Image: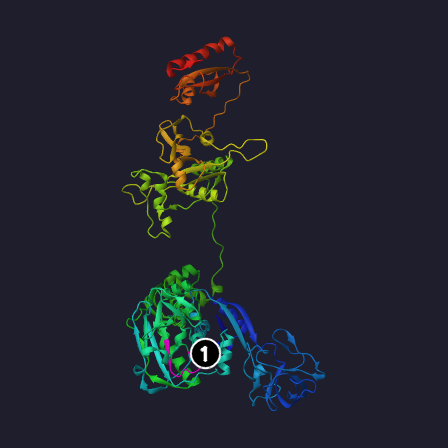
Amino acid sequence: MIVTYNWLKEFVDFDLSPQELSDLLTMLGLEVEGVRHVGGGLDEVVVAIVEERAQHPNADKLSLCRVNNGRETLAIVCGAQNFKAGDKVALAQLGAVLPGDFKIKRSKIRGEESCGMLCSEKELGLAAESDGILILPPDLPLGVPVFEALALKDTIFEIGLTPNRADCLSIVGVAREIAAKLGMNVRYTGHSVEESNFPISERAEVIVEDAELCPRYTARYIAGCSVGPSPAWLVRRLEAVGMRSINNVVDVTNYVLMEYGHPLHAFDADLLAGGKIIVRRAAEAERFSTLDGQERVLTAADLTIRDGEKGVALAGIMGGENSEIRQDTANILLESAYFNPSAIRRTSKRLGLHTESSHRFERGADVDILLTALDRAASLIAELAGGEIARGAIDVYPRSLPSRTVRFRVKRCNELLGIQLAADEMAAIFNRLEFTVNSVEPGLLDVTVPSFRVDVEREIDLVEEVARLNGYNTIPVTMPKARVFSDRPTRHQRLEKRLRNVMVGQGFSEIINFSFMAPGVLDKLLLADDDPRRSVVRLRNPLVEEQSVMRTALLPGLLETASRNLNYRMLTLRMFELRRVYLPMEGQELPREPLHLAGILTGARYREGWNQERYQVDFYDVKGVVEHILDEFAVTSVSYVQDCLHPYFHPGKSCSVRSGDELLGSFGELHPDVQDNFEIDQPVHYLELDFEKLAMLSSDNVTIKPPSRFPDTFRDIAMLISDEAPASAILDCIGGLKIREVECAEIFDLYKGTHIPEGFKSVAVRIRYRSQEKTLTDDEVSPLHQRIVDTLVKKLEVTIR
């Protein structure tokens, strides 16, 4: 918001310097971001009279003038053609520095000496463009600085307003703040509307069909206007606040906009079919051309102003080309209305159309100032453009908007601000802000908020008003109380971090997907219709259908991420996610949210290199990852079985992992159909573990066993065993004997083919023996080994080869 020092003084008779005013506004919360002095440093530009003007002897388009500044007569060379001898002009004397850091020096122009410069409005910073030099009123005294003689010296303040302070988007609003702080009264502009004999009802009619989006609409009719240029004072005032002059009618609406902060719009009444104004929503996909020459496609949510046949304006945003004020406009219908802020904001954002009008309406206008702004503008138009104002004003206001009254506790305010103000002192502050105060009981006030303060809704807003007007510098400075807490991570948090470190150490990258998924994505996993994971928590207001339910599995997100990366030719992937899934519970409002670990492997086992073959990851790679996790968490009694498998696993290349009777999870290659459903054309291996169970079964105690000082010895056993028997059964059988001297047992060979009977496989096991107390002899090892062989033959029915 841009305001000027002189314009503010028309409403408040303060005696502050520009710097003091800048400081006061900033301390009121209206931060001054920039200050510009109009006419400052231009005292060397004085009033002078052209005594003689002659043709330059060496140039056709230059004049050689003799100019009197009241003290001496100077020779000036000038290129302008819009002046004559006897005119009073603005003379920039030697040494003057004009805007743009242009210094006036003695010079020779085409052989003739020039001792100064006759200035235009543009060169003095008074206008963006000018056709010639500035011609001054003939009664101004010679030698007086031009800006002083014309009373043009001013200071322009650029204020950075927060979005809630819509009341300060006007000169009156800022003046009201100054007056409240200084304990003065605002001198509101007095104006009277001289109405003619013909009633407005004969010339115009207003129908509001959507009172929700347009609670109030007022209008006046002005007949017989002459559209033309605005007077210099109006042009300069608008340019001072950053607005361009258009014509006297439009300039008046902009002037009142800046003065009172309420947008107005002038229609060419002769272009309104039937003399009607109808306020209603647009038709879906309706097209409308705004004043900027752009065709807009509207929706049924956009509010429009229409005549008897067509749309003529986008309500609260911009008028239409088909009803704008033209040079031949004679009759004007002047609109002053209040529109719903949310509706204006939605339309403005959707169309990308931000105007001075929409800027104010979408922040909240003052519904009670409509007639004041309307009458002010109508009287100025009649003054500057002539014409007659019809008798009466149209005011469609079916249901008055209620006022707001806020209960205010004096004691609570003092506690929050750390000050001690009496109730009558706070009431005086509210009165200066034009609030209405009623005392309910000692220390308790009912404060009625004026319609222009749309930002005040709660008690804390009133507390802020007390702080602003009483002065932020009166609030005592205290150091905040601070306590130092030492929050050690819980066991659960430590295990989470350890698991992430384990996965990263195995070459995985952690990804984070949305906690939402599409309902149909579960079909891609081949889940049965009665699978409990198909029971999902639905979002009430999802952004898109693809994220409309809470996820019950991590696999879909991982596969979508993998598919996207594979499309980018990232063919080797190791990714994991340690996040929660959301499983509804019958009879419970909130779902269960267990933490799950899920990871996928696909592509090459190692990086490509000249000295190694390119192997693809397989079942045993993902099994190795699971084994490493279980070792790190010291989970015991682990077994791998082919039961409780999910339908998205390959039935012959996957298994479940258990610890005792607890099912920890499963892993293996994904079913080819699942990979096809996610448009993945290479094998993907997947692991999933229930972190909650993993944490429950993990041990924090690490058993350290010192290595034996004595040498080991090993024996091999080659045997035939049924294809259906898992190899782990052999190791379990050996371990079940609990022979202290058996250090480890490992399967080192598997063979099927020639000389092996159908339905059998050849497995070789190496058993390492070692004692902690002595070196074992063959006589000591042999019976132990034979015991193992006998047990394998008896329990597993193996045939020793």
Task: Give coordinates of residue 622: x percent, y percent.
Answer: 45, 32
User: On the rendered image, what quadrant is the C terminus found in?
Assistant: top left
Name the element at disc 1.
helix
- Please identify the residue farthest to the right as the structure is shown: 111
Count of numbered tags: 1
| Residue 554 visible, this orientation | no
| Placement of 255 over or under 716, stated as above or below | below
On screen, residue 87 versus residue 231, left or right, reads right
- Please identify the residue farthest to the front as the structure is shown: 754
Task: Give coordinates of residue 204: x percent, y percent.
Answer: 32, 80
**Magenta stretch containing residue 331, yes or no?**
yes
**551, 601: nearer the viewer:** 601
**653, 160: nearer the viewer:** 653
Magenta part of the chain: 325-335
Task: Give coordinates of residue 752: x percent, y percent.
Answer: 44, 20
**318, 288: nearer the viewer:** 288
| Residue 671 visible, this orientation | yes
Which residue is at 38% across, 13% downward?
794
Q: Which residue is mark 1?
A: 251
Task: Give coordinates of residue 138: x percent, y percent.
Answer: 56, 90
User: Within 10 Å of the Cα at label 1, are there few (<14), some (14-19), or many (20+) other Cα atoms?
Assistant: many
**Magenta stretch containing residue 526, yes or no?**
no
Task: Give the residue type that dot 1 points to.
Answer: Asp
Name the image quarter holding residue 347: bottom left
Name the image quarter holding residue 328: bottom left
> Which secondary structure dominates the residues rendered in magenta?
loop
Name the image quarter holding residue 495: top left
| Placement of 278 over or under 663, stated as above or below | below
- Please identify the residue farthest to the left as the structure is shown: 587
